[in-house]
């Protein structure tokens, strides 16, 4: 078992699955012409990304639900992962959804909402189905380039 301060990697995947479903609902609702309802759902998703980005994935509502309800029913994880890259990924999701939300409020740019929802869905789908976190990969690239530094004592992710 890896570092005891790490997180169960299945938690962020679970959260990504919930996010992916909500993003598909947002797109579907928007396509049916209920743009206000779609905007409200998308605003909720944006707030949840903000929660994860600022509070960290250990305090993310989907992660807390996973830890309390789902994880006790599963076998223990074979390894834990550093929570920093998934927390950074929440920030990436926040930037994408917030940009889409704000741009969609400008007359003539309403398509920004389903486009941003589609981009966020791709990332959520890759994470939930294939355990490939795009935001985590961006984090690791920025660390390798020296743009971001790892926290002292935090192991490098593979």
Image (spheres, rainbow, N blue to C red):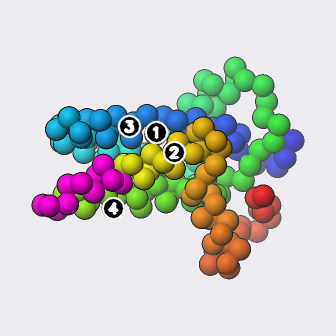
The image quarter in which residue 87 lies: bottom right
User: Could you say which is closer to the camera, residue 121 or residue 61?
Assistant: 121
From the viewer's perspective, tell me whether residue 104 is left or right of residue 99: left
Mark 3 touching mark 4, by CB under 8 A? Answer: no
Which label's residue is closer to the chain start, 2 or 1? 1
Q: Earlier in the sequence, mark 3 or mark 4?
A: 3
Q: Measured along the vertical axis of the image, is residue 82 above or below residue 80?
A: below
Camera sees residue 98 = yes
Q: Is residue 84 one of those drawn in magenta? A: no
Q: What SS does tag 1 mark?
A: helix
Q: Quadrant of residue 48?
A: top left
With respect to residue 35, does 94 lie above or below?
A: below
Which of the two marks, 2 or 4, is nearer to us in this view?
2
Q: Which residues are magenta?
A: 106-116
Residue 120 drawn at (x, y percent) = 44, 50
Q: Which residue is mark 1?
A: 20
User: x, y (%) of residue 88?
Assistant: 57, 59
The CA distance from mark 2 to mark 4 is 17 Å
Pointer 1 with pointer 4, Cβ within 8 A: no
Q: Earlier in the sequence, mark 1 or mark 4?
A: 1
Q: Residue furthest left?
A: 107
Alpha carbons under labels 2 and 3: distance apart? 11 Å
Q: Tag 4 or tag 2, which sits nearer the N-term?
A: 4
Residue at the image position 46 percent from the left and 39 percent from the top? 20
Mark 2–mark 1 CB contact (< 8 Å):
yes
Per the image, label 3 sits on a secondary structure element best described as helix
Image mark for residue 124: 2
């Amino acid at each position: 078992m890896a570092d005891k301060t790490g997180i169960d990697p299945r938690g962020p995947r679970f959260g990504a699955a919930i996010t992916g479903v909500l993003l598909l609902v947002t797109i579907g609702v928007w396509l049916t012409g209920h743009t206000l309802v779609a905007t409200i759902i998308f605003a909720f998703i944006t707030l949840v990304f903000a929660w994860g980005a600022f509070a960290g994935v250990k305090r993310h509502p989907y992660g807390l639900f996973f830890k309390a309800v789902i994880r006790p029913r599963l076998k223990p994880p074979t390894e834990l992962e550093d929570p920093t890259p998934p927390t950074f990924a929440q920030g990436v999701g926040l930037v994408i959804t917030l940009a889409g939300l704000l741009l969609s409020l400008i007359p003539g740019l309403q398509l920004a909402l389903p486009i941003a929802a589609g981009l966020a869905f791709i990332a959520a789908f890759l994470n939930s189905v294939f355990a490939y976190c795009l935001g985590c990969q961006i984090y690791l690239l920025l660390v390798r380039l020296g743009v971001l530094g790892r926290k002292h004592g935090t192991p490098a992710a593979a």
